[in-house]
Image (cartoon, helix red, strand yellow):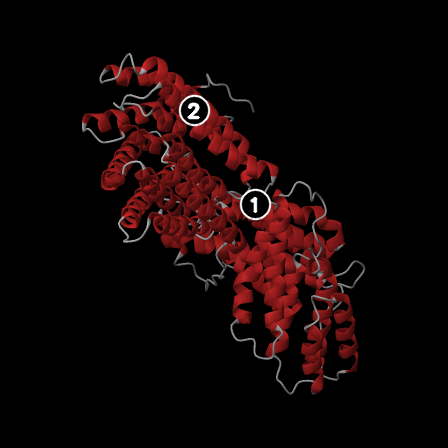
């Protein structure tokens, strides 16, 4: 649906944003804060679509700014040569750049601001070494003014987070997971490949946004445990169904389970899926619609899914008093460690080199460019796919810097002081507010406004030549072009991120097959589902992969369960067969199909029925997940 700039919602939100920025700047000039234009800058990034995210973003902007200002001031007073101080700055920026991929939701925003603010304090000090305390203080004062004004004015016009709609969405996806399980038992997993990809991609996207959707609410954060449990339950139901019918043409029954038992289960699962899709608050006190003997994993996964659904369908306190035992799953945090390392290296090196270059030249133009070279790598590096945002960021920066140069050349010299200064700035803020409010220009609008305020230096009294004004704007735009161009020309690869997720899966499985697994089994319980979600998230974003998703994304969870079951068997079970099985499993990555064949051979010669069943499950899991295990 196309949205016009004259749309009422866009105009209203644009006016609110412009008013917030104008009031913040006005207050900062009235109290004579240095660099008062900084006060308007928080408005454009703190303002969000929901009140909860706005409040948390405001909080973490203040915390990050305070911490970054303190660190920046401390770095400048380290008794060491300037280049050592710049090296320490690079390490601090690298740390916070990496944390943006470790701290999820709004929390990473605090780390982002801590890195940016330290650079803002340190880099300009090469031109005025004695002004570091004034810069740090002004930065904090302007941030507090901007955040307070934004929270009060914008917060009143911002709706609450759509928590209930989110809960309905995740419950709907859990219903899709149950329906998928029914269809897998009816037709087999290969026939449901497209539906599996859709469900996994949507669950991973929704789960990744959960902390943003529920931000700003104590109840929302307490509900995250239920969301995690629901996600694990949904993946468990899907993978259990695949394990019950792992290969096309294979019988649905298992040893000790009557063949044809799925005939009665399929309609019951279908009925349950329809019930979960209902928006009404239906009681779901039963733990499972099937007997555990028919499929123990499927029964337990359904119980978990139903319990989490029942909790999310009721008020928080009521959900704590449900008449059945709630089994909350542990889902490892979503942390992109490889990407954190790359972002840390790029942003830290850029900050060190930029500060060193600024110090070596002592040129105001180079200092302006160095500021951009410290800020833009952090901003872009913190994103999942910066190549998609880089063109918009570059457009916004170039446009904002160009308009700022015109403002400084043509308007500000005529109206240099308040109150005329306030009113001449208002039209530019209004245009910026509309750009920020419109969905199509929102991303570029942020950078337009930030760079307009930064390059215009509205309210500054120092006399600057026209060449210096144009040069300063050009330097900021050049820094943006350098950083954005790097991501456009060498884009971050979703396929590589998917391969990294598979690498973690392989590593965790190999840890589990060691004679003394230690914490490996517990880590797999927490990380197995997380890596499947992470893999689905990256594959869903990889347009070039298309339909070439590796098979076995759900079967690998069954493989982990089977390895755990092998550990739980008595050491005396099957004599040397159990030890031989562990030995064969050490080759599960390099030759999954060959390993499966060896396990089937062992299953055929062992007289121990429980061990024979586990070995068969291991072989099924390896054959079904072979394509995933060799992915990349």
Residue at figure coordinates x 51%, y 47% from the top left: 208
Quadrant where the C terminus is found in the figure: bottom right
User: Looking at the image, can residue 12 be seen?
Assistant: no
Residue 288 screen position, x and y as percent = 57, 61
- Circle 2 residue: 400
Residue 331 appears in the rendering? yes
Q: Looking at the picture, how far across and down is residue 575, in whole percent?
A: 69, 87
The residue depicted at 51 percent of the width and 32 percent of the height is: 481
Residue furthest to the left:
31
**Up-down: is 267 above or below 457?**
below
Provide the secondary structure element on which disc 1 rests: helix
**Crowd rating for badge 1 (residues with CA inside 10 Å; few <14, some 14–19, many 20+):** some
Q: Residues within 10 Å of mark 2 (few under 14, many from 20)?
A: many
Residue at the spot 35% in from the left edge and 13% down from the top edge: 410
Please, is residue 238 above or below residue 128 in the view? below
Residue 75 x, y percent position in the rendering: 30, 49
Question: Residue 352: x and y, percent?
Answer: 42, 46
| Contact between labelled residues 2 and 1, with CB atoms less than 8 Å apart | no
Q: Along the horizontal axis of the image, is 260 left or right of 133?
A: right
Q: How many marks?
A: 2
Query: In terms of depth relative to the viewer, which is nearer, 132 or 213?
Result: 132
In whole angstroms, how far apart are the C-alphas of marks 1 and 2?
47 Å
- Residue bearing the label numbered 1: 277
Quarter occupied by the N terminus: top right
| Residue 515 placement, left or right of 349 | right
Q: Residue at x 75, y 83 (%)?
A: 606
N-term-proximal mark, 1 vs 2: 1
- Residue 279 or residue 600, whichever sits in front: 600
Camera-nearest label, 1 or 2: 2
Q: Secondary structure at mark 2?
A: helix
């Amino acid at each position: 649906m196309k949205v016009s700039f004259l749309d009422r919602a866009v105009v209203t939100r644009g006016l609110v944003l412009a008013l917030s920025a104008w009031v913040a700047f006005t207050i900062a000039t009235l109290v004579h804060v240095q660099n008062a234009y900084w006060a308007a800058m928080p408005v454009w990034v703190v303002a969000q679509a929901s009140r909860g995210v706005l409040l948390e973003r405001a909080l973490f902007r203040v915390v990050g700014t305070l911490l970054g200002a303190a660190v920046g001031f401390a770095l400048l007073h380290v008794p060491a040569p300037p280049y050592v101080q710049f090296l320490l700055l690079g390490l601090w920026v690298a740390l916070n750049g990496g944390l943006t991929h470790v701290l999820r939701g709004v929390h990473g925003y605090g780390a982002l601001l801590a890195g940016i603010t330290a650079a803002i304090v340190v880099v300009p000090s090469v031109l005025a070494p004695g002004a570091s305390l004034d810069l740090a203080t002004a930065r904090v004062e302007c941030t507090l003014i901007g955040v307070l004004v934004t929270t009060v004015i914008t917060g009143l016009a911002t709706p609450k987070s759509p928590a209930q709609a989110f809960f309905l969405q995740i419950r709907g996806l859990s219903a899709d997971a149950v329906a998928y399980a029914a269809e897998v038992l009816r037709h087999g997993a290969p026939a449901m490949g497209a539906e599996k990809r859709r469900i996994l991609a949507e669950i991973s996207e929704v789960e990744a946004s959960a902390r943003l959707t529920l931000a700003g609410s104590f109840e929302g954060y307490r509900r995250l445990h239920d969301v995690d449990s629901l996600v694990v339950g949904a993946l468990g139901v899907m993978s259990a169904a695949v394990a019950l019918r792992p290969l096309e043409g294979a019988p649905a029954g298992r040893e000790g389970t009557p063949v044809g038992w799925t005939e009665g289960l399929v309609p019951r699962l279908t009925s349950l899926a329809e019930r979960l899709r209902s928006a009404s608050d239906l009681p779901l006190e039963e733990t499972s619609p099937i007997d555990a003997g028919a499929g123990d994993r499927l029964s337990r996964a359904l119980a978990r899914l139903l319990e989490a659904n029942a909790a999310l369908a009721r008020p928080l306190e009521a959900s704590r008093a449900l008449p059945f035992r709630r089994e909350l799953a542990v889902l490892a945090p979503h942390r992109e460690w490889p990407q954190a390392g790359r972002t840390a290296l790029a942003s830290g090196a850029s900050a060190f080199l930029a500060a060193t270059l600024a110090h070596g030249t002592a040129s105001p133009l180079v200092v302006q460019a160095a500021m951009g070279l410290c800020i833009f790598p952090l901003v872009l590096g913190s994103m999942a796919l910066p190549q998609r945002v880089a063109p918009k960021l570059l457009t916004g920066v170039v446009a904002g810097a160009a308009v700022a140069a015109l403002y400084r050349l043509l308007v500000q010299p005529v109206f240099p002081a308040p109150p005329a200064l306030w009113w001449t700035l208002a039209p530019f803020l209004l245009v910026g507010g509309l750009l920020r409010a419109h969905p199509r220009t929102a991303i570029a609008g942020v950078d337009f406004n930030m760079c307009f305020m930064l390059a215009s230096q509205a309210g500054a009294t120092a006399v600057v030549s026209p060449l210096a004004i144009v040069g300063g704007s050009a330097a900021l735009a050049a820094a943006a072009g350098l950083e954005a161009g790097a991501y456009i020309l060498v884009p971050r690869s979703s396929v590589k991120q998917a391969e990294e997720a598979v690498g973690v899966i392989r590593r965790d499985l190999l840890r589990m097959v060691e004679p003394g697994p230690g914490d490996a089994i517990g880590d797999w319980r927490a990380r197995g589902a997380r890596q499947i979600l992470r893999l689905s998230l990256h594959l869903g974003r990889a347009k070039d992969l298309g339909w070439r998703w590796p098979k076995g994304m759900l079967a690998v969870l069954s493989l982990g369960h089977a390895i755990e079951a092998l550990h739980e068997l008595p050491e005396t079970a099957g004599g040397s067969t159990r030890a031989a099985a562990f030995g064969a499993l050490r080759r599960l990555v390099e030759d999954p199909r060959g390993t499966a064949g060896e396990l089937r051979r062992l299953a055929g010669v062992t007289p121990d029925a429980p061990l024979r069943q586990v070995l068969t499950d291991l072989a099924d899991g390896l054959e079904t997940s072979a394509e995933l295990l060799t992915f990349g």
